[in-house]
Image (cartoon, rainbow, N blue to C red):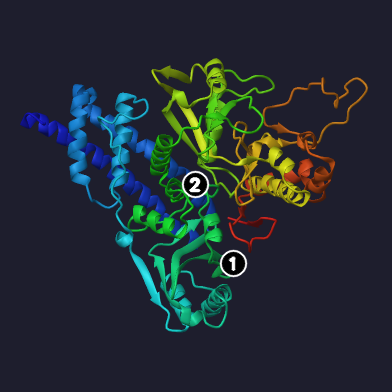
C-alpha cells in the first residue's frame, strides 16, 4: 500500500511520466503513419522507405527519453523495487479498459527492464498477463450492403475509399472487382449470395500499393476480401482482388514489410485479421502492422505458454552449422533462436558489431517478401532442463560472453528469434525433381528481388536460404548483408603464369565491398541438373554487368515493384522516383 501523500505523489508522477512517454511515442508513430497516404498519392516511394526506418527507431528513442525523464523526476526512488510495484498498480488502474491498453503496458514493461536490467521477466514490477480482449466492436468499419448487385456495391466501395488523385476508370475497376468475386463464388448466384462488404476504416499502405482490408458476409459464411490499388502514370486503379485466406495470408506474411495503417484500434484490427487468418500467429499480425514491440511481447508470451504445455528439448536446428551463429529450435514450436559466437572462425572476417548492424539494416529495410522478420531479445531466459546436453556444451564453449547459467535457467544476453523454414540445401534433396527445379528457379528470383530492393545477400550458399510453408524461397542469414549501392562489381582478371588466379590457394587483396560475380558459381553446390536449370534463367547473376546495372538503377533512385500476389510478373518492374 502507498503509505504517505508524498510517496503517493512520487508514484503518480512515475506512472504519469511513463504514460506521457507512451503517448509521445504513439503520437510520433501515428504522424509518420499518416504521411503514407500522401506518399502514395505523390508516388513518393523513397520517402515511404525512409519512413519505414524512422518508425522502427521510434520505440527505442522514446523509451530512452522516458527513462531519462524518470531519472530527473525521481532521483534515488528510480531503483526502488517496492516503489515500482506501486507504480505498476497505479498505472494499471488508470489505463485499464482503455483502447490498446496492452500497448501501454508493454511500454511500461520496457521502462522497468531498462531501469533494472531485468533478466527474463520480473513479475513483481511488470505486467505479465495479456490484457483482456477488446473485441472488434472497437474497430471502426465501413459497411456496404449488396442489394443483389455486386457492380453497384463495388462502385460504392471505391468511391468511399477515394484519393485526391482520381481513379483511371473507377466504373471499369468496379466491374472487374465484381467479376472476380462472381468467379470465386461460383457464378450466377454470387450477387444474391453476397449480403455485404465490411472494410476496416483505413487504407493499408505497403511499398507501392494501397490495400483495402475487409470481409464479405455471405449467406452461409464469411470470406476475406483485400483490394490492392496501384498508382501509376495514368492514375489510381485496382490491381488485384484477393478472396482466399491463402492469398491474404501472403499479403500479411512475416516476410513482408510493415504496413502503414491507422485503424481505430490496432488490437481490434489484429483480432479482426486473426478471424480471417486463424492460422496466422497473433505476434506476426502485430509485427506486420508496424507494432514491433507488441509483436515481440506476444511472441514471448506464446513461447512461454507453449513451454508450459510441452516437454520436448531445444536442439540444434536442421542444416549446416554456421560460423557466426549457433542456431537452435524447439521441434514442437515454429521458431529458431540465433546466438552469436564469441569468436568467428575463418574465412569470416566480420565482427560482432558488423553482424548487429547487418540485422539492424534488415529491420529498417523493405523485406520484399524475401527477408524473414527477426526480433532481437536481450536477457532472454529459458529453462535449462529443456536443452539437449550437446547444445548446452556448444553454447557454453562457443558463446560464454552471451550465455550464462543462473540456477535452473539459461540466460542469453542477446538472441535473434525468427520463424523456422526448411533450409534450401536440405529441401532440394527431399522433394521430387520438378519441385526441386521450381525452388531453384525461385532461389534465383529471390536473389534478384533482394537486389532490386538494394540488398546484396553476401553469402549465396543454398544453406542460407529457406523454403516457407507456402513454397516461397526466402533469405535468412544476415551476417554479411550489404546494400548493392555500397558494393563494387568487377569481372575476374585473366590469370597468368605468375598469378594462377583460379587456384584455391591463390589470394589477392580486395576491399570488403569488392564483388566478383563470376565466383558465384562456386556457391551453386547442387546436382548438375539443378545447376543447369538455374543457369537457364539466372546466368546473368554471374556477370558483373548485371549487378552494375542494378546498382545504377538504385543510385538513380528507381524503386522495384515487388507485390505479394499473382498478377506480378516474374521480373520486378522499375519505377522512377
- Relative placement, left or right, of 534 versus 465 is right
Mark 1 to mark 2 CA distance (whole Å): 23 Å
Q: Residues within 10 Å of mark 1 (few under 14, many from 20)?
A: few
Is residue 324 depicted above or below 154 in this figure? Answer: above
Task: Say how many tags the image has.
Answer: 2
Is residue 485 depicted above or below 192 in this figure? Answer: above
Q: Is residue 14 visible?
A: no
- Relative placement, left or right, of 237 versus 451 is left
Screen quadrant of the C terminus: bottom right
Secondary structure under badge 1?
Answer: loop
Q: Residue at x 54, y 30 (%)?
A: 338
Secondary structure under badge 2?
Answer: helix
Q: Residue at x 48, y 49 (%)?
A: 258
Of the numbered discs in the image, which one, if any, rests on residue 338?
Answer: none
- Earlier residue among tags 1 and 2: 2
Disc 2 target residue = 50
Disc 1 target residue = 233
Quarter residue 197 falls in: bottom left
Q: Is residue 351 visible?
A: yes
> Which sits in the foreground, 36 or 127?
127
Residue 571: image location, x then y, percent: 70, 56
- Relative placement, left or right, of 226 versus 77 is right
Is residue 239 depicted above or below 479 in this figure? Answer: below
Quarter residue 231 falls in: bottom right
Could you tell me if the residues under marks 1 and 2 are in contact, i.e. CB atoms within 8 Å?
Answer: no
Residue 175: image location, x then y, percent: 54, 79
Q: Residue at x 49, y 72 (%)?
A: 166
Residue 516: image location, x then y, percent: 76, 34
Q: Residue at x 54, y 34 (%)?
A: 359
Residue 170: image location, x then y, percent: 51, 77
Screen quadrant of the N terminus: top left
Amino acid at each position: 500500500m502507498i503509505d504517505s501523500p508524498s510517496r503517493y505523489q512520487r508514484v503518480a508522477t512515475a506512472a504519469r511520466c511513463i504514460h506521457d512517454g507512451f503517448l509521445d511515442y504513439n503520437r510520433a508513430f501515428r504522424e509518420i503513419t499518416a504521411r503514407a497516404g500522401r506518399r502514395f498519392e505523390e508516388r513518393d516511394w523513397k520517402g515511404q522507405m525512409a519512413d519505414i526506418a524512422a518508425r522502427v527507431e521510434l520505440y527505442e528513442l522514446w523509451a530512452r527519453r522516458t527513462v531519462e525523464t524518470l531519472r530527473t523526476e525521481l532521483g534515488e526512488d528510480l531503483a526502488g523495487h517496492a516503489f515500482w510495484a506501486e507504480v505498476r498498480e497505479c498505472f494499471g488502474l488508470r489505463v485499464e479498459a482503455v483502447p490498446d491498453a496492452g500497448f501501454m503496458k508493454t511500454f511500461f514493461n520496457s521502462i522497468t527492464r531498462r531501469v533494472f536490467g531485468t533478466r527474463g521477466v520480473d513479475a513483481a514490477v511488470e505486467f505479465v498477463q495479456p490484457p483482456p480482449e477488446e473485441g472488434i466492436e472497437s474497430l471502426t468499419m465501413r459497411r456496404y450492403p449488396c442489394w443483389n448487385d455486386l457492380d453497384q456495391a463495388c462502385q460504392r466501395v471505391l468511391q468511399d475509399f477515394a484519393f485526391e488523385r482520381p481513379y483511371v476508370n473507377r466504373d471499369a475497376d468496379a466491374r472487374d472487382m465484381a467479376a472476380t468475386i462472381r468467379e470465386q463464388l461460383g457464378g450466377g448466384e454470387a450477387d444474391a449470395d453476397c449480403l455485404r462488404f465490411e472494410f476496416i476504416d483505413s487504407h493499408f499502405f505497403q511499398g507501392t500499393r494501397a490495400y483495402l482490408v475487409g470481409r464479405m458476409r455471405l449467406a452461409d459464411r464469411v470470406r476475406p476480401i483485400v483490394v490492392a490499388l496501384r498508382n501509376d502514370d495514368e492514375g489510381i486503379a485496382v490491381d488485384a482482388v484477393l478472396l482466399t485466406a491463402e492469398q491474404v495470408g501472403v499479403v500479411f506474411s512475416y516476410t513482408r514489410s510493415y504496413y502503414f495503417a491507422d485503424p481505430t484500434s490496432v488490437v481490434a484490427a489484429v483480432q479482426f485479421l486473426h478471424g480471417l487468418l486463424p492460422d496466422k500467429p497473433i505476434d506476426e499480425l502485430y509485427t506486420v502492422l508496424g507494432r514491433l514491440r507488441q509483436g515481440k511481447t506476444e511472441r514471448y508470451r506464446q513461447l512461454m505458454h507453449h513451454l508450459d504445455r510441452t516437454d520436448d528439448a531445444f536442439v540444434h536446428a536442421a542444416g549446416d552449422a554456421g560460423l557466426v551463429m549457433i542456431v537452435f529450435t524447439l521441434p514442437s514450436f515454429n521458431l529458431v533462436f540465433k546466438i552469436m559466437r564469441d569468436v568467428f572462425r575463418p574465412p569470416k572476417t566480420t565482427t560482432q558489431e558488423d553482424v548487429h548492424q547487418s540485422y539492424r539494416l534488415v529491420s529498417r529495410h523493405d523485406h520484399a517478401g524475401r527477408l524473414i522478420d527477426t526480433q532481437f531479445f536481450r536477457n532472454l531466459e529459458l529453462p535449462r532442463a529443456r536443452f539437449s546436453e550437446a547444445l548446452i556444451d556448444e553454447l557454453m564453449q562457443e558463446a560464454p560472453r552471451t550465455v550464462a547459467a543462473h540456477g535452473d535457467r539459461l540466460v542469453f544476453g542477446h538472441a535473434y528469434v525468427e520463424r523456422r523454414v526448411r533450409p534450401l540445401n536440405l529441401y532440394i534433396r527431399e522433394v521430387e525433381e520438378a519441385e526441386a527445379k521450381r525452388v531453384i528457379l525461385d532461389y534465383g528470383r529471390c536473389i534478384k528481388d533482394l537486389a532490386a530492393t538494394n540488398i546484396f545477400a553476401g553469402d549465396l550458399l543454398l544453406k542460407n536460404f529457406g523454403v516457407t510453408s507456402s513454397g516461397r524461397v526466402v533469405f535468412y542469414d544476415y551476417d554479411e548483408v550489404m546494400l548493392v549501392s555500397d558494393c563494387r562489381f568487377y569481372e575476374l582478371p585473366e590469370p597468368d603464369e605468375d598469378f594462377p588466379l583460379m587456384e584455391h590457394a591463390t589470394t589477392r587483396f580486395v576491399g570488403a565491398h569488392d564483388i566478383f560475380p563470376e565466383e558465384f558459381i562456386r556457391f551453386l553446390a547442387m546436382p548438375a541438373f539443378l545447376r543447369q536449370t538455374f543457369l537457364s534463367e539466372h546466368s546473368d547473376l554471374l556477370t558483373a554487368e548485371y549487378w552494375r546495372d542494378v546498382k545504377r538503377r538504385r543510385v538513380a533512385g528507381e524503386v522495384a515493384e515487388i507485390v505479394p500476389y499473382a498478377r506480378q510478373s516474374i521480373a520486378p518492374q522499375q519505377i522512377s522516383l
